[in-house]
Amino acid sequence: MSDARGGEAFARLLAERRLLVCVGPGGVGKTTVAAAMGLHAARSGRKTLVLTIDPARRLATMLGLDGLDDEERPVPVEQLEPLAGAARERAAMYAAMLDTGAAYDSLIKRIAEDEDHRQRIYNNRLYQVMSRSFGASHAYVAMERLYYAMEDGDYDLIVLDTPPTRNALDILDAPGRLSTFLDENVVRWFIRNKQPSSLRERLLSRGGAAATKLLGRIVGEQLVDDLSEFFEVFLSLREGFSRRAERVQRAMRADDCGFVLVSSALATNLVDARFLHEGLAEREVPVEAVVFNRAFIPLDLPAAEPRAARAEALASAICPKGQDDDAARERVREALTSLERLHDVVTAENAAGQRDIDAFCEALAAYCVRVTTPRFDEELRDLSALARLGELLCT
Ligand SMILES: Nc1ncnc2c1ncn2[C@@H]1O[C@H](COP(=O)(O)OP(=O)(O)OP(=O)(O)O)[C@@H](O)[C@H]1O
Ligand SMILES: [Mg+2]
């Protein structure tokens, strides 16, 4: 139940943008919302890719796929009716999951010039550790994967799902951090077989020799060899890294990209969401839309009728006089009264959530689209449930 203007404006983002990045606190439904957005755009006639980082099996099942990995797989959207007026030729949805190790390997395959170079990288023990570990290196390779999809994929829209809160900012910081790291002189210290030319380089090289010798004594020659080779190999790729990092950074700040902040209405999530909103603002990345997901429980009981009278009327309907004993009627009446109380609790919670959402929205820019989605009765299990969420986001 998004407000009408919010829903329409959200639909426009899905129809017009080329890249949408979903960020938000943990567990609020980022991956689910990202998939619902991709599906809605596909049903509207766009060729869409959802790039997720979520290894949850649930997502693949929901999309009707056997599994998800680095490869872009077609989602069987033809199971669903396209939306009214959709151009069918381009309507398609693909999904891929970012597997850090596999993404690094295919990155090296794309950029290292020859087989020998590639094998040296693959066999390097430090590369193996770095490419399989989570953290900033993950955010970095997410950028590389995104770059590849944007350059090669012929997609109308890419929806990028990110890890929770603070890590999401890594996506904006990691590429810069990596290029800076590769620029550091300390990296050069480890490179043994480079001929120093300038005086500065010679001095650095001497410092490097001393440092590597000392390190060799502490951690062992083999590790130093690995380190030295690792940095050498990465330095040789540095130019490519920096160039692509720059392009992705530019793409994420371009007009056809939008950041979508997903949160729930829970106070703890809203604190995290505010942190993210500020973190993005510091990086000069505007938030185009906020989705308050699972923000309320839909209630359709009318509130006007006096409840005692309603309980009495319902009890009479369920246990007509004369057919059942008074005790049964009384139990039904009690059950209905409890339900009414529950209704009150939920109404109060919905109202409190809405107040917190309103307070949160005060800090948002006027152009920022706001949509609110209900908590579904059950897990979103399949494409139709996702399609329903997509429609709720856009109406
Ligand atoms: N509107 C909704 N109503 C009911 N359940 C929902 C709704 N949106 C998401 N969920 C459920 O909430 C759970 C968490 O969703 P999801 O995995 O998308 O969150 P996430 O933000 O990506 O989590 P993480 O931060 O761990 O990546 C899932 O079980 C999903 O089915
Ligand atoms: Mg997720």
Image (cartoon, rainbow, N blue to C red):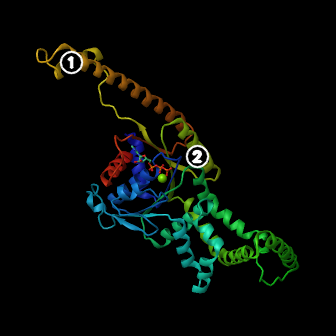
> Between 189 and 218, which is closer to the camera in this rendering?
218
Say which residue appears at 50% left-offset and 65% top-offset: 99
Q: Which residue is identified by label 2?
A: 277
In the displayed structure, 263 sits above or below 241; it is above
Mark yes or no: residue 306 visible: no
User: Does 254 sit left or right of 76 as displayed?
Assistant: right
- Camera-near label (2 vs 1) is 1
Q: Which residue is identified by label 1?
A: 328
In the displayed structure, 113 sits above or below 98; it is below
User: Does 12 sit left or right of 279 as displayed?
Assistant: left
In the displayed structure, 304 sits above or below 144; it is above
CB of mark 2 near ligand 1 (< 8 Å) = no
The percent coordinates of residue 103 (x first, y second) are 53, 69
The quarter in which the C terminus is drawn is top left
The percent coordinates of residue 136 (x first, y second) are 62, 60
The crowd level at tag 1 (other Cα within 10 Å; few <14, some 14-19, many 20+) is few
Q: Residue furthest left?
A: 322
* Mark number, residue 257: none
Q: Earlier in the sequence, mark 2 or mark 1?
A: 2
The quarter in which the N terminus is drawn is top left
Q: Amino acid at mark 1?
A: Ala
Give the distance between the C-alpha atoms of the residues marked 2 and 1, in whole angstroms. Answer: 55 Å
- Label 1 secondary element: helix
The crowd level at tag 2 (other Cα within 10 Å; few <14, some 14-19, many 20+) is many
In the displayed structure, 155 sits above or below 272; it is below
